Amino acid sequence: MPSLLFKAQLIDQAGKSRIQVARILFGVDSPEEKEKTFRLICKSKYPHLHIQEPLSITPAPLD
């Protein structure tokens, strides 16, 4: 059950950086499914902003 840390910079229509979002997702989902979930979280919380590609995806430290 790998835990992954996702980070994304969200930008507005003019391409200006507005916010950084970070989430740790864990569970039995594949990394691809976790990425889809993270993208949906960003879109639902900030529908007026877009993800500046690429996402940062790293193993999450669970201390």
Image (cartoon, rainbow, N blue to C red):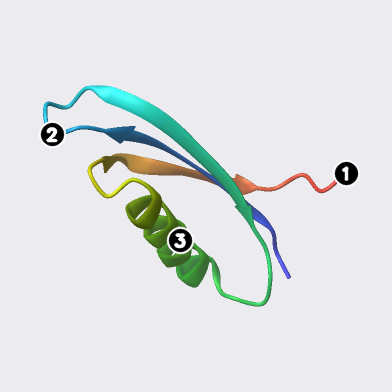
- Residue 48 place in picture, x, y as percent: 22, 43
Q: Nearer the viewer, mark 2 or mark 3?
A: 2
- Residue 4 place in picture, x, y as percent: 63, 54
Q: Rounded to the nearest whole Å, what is the CA distance between mark 2 and mark 3?
A: 23 Å
Residue placed under numbered mark 1 in the picture: 63
Residue placed under numbered mark 2 in the picture: 13
Q: Is residue 6 left or right of residue 8?
A: right
Compared with residue 25, is residue 46 higher up or lower down, i.e. above or below?
above
Q: Residue furthest right?
A: 63
Q: Nearer the viewer, mark 2 or mark 1?
A: 2
Task: Please state which amino acid type lies under the numbered disc 2.
Answer: Gln
Q: Residue furthest top?
A: 16
Residue placed under numbered mark 3 in the picture: 35
Label 3 neighbour load within 10 Å: few <14, some 14-19, many 20+:
some
SS assignment at label 2:
loop
Q: Are marks 1 and 3 in contact (CB under 8 Å)?
A: no
SS assignment at label 3:
helix
Q: Which quadrant of the rendered structure holds the N terminus?
A: bottom right
Q: Rounded to the nearest whole Å, what is the CA distance between mark 2 and mark 1?
A: 38 Å
Q: Which quadrant of the rendered structure holds the C terminus?
A: top right
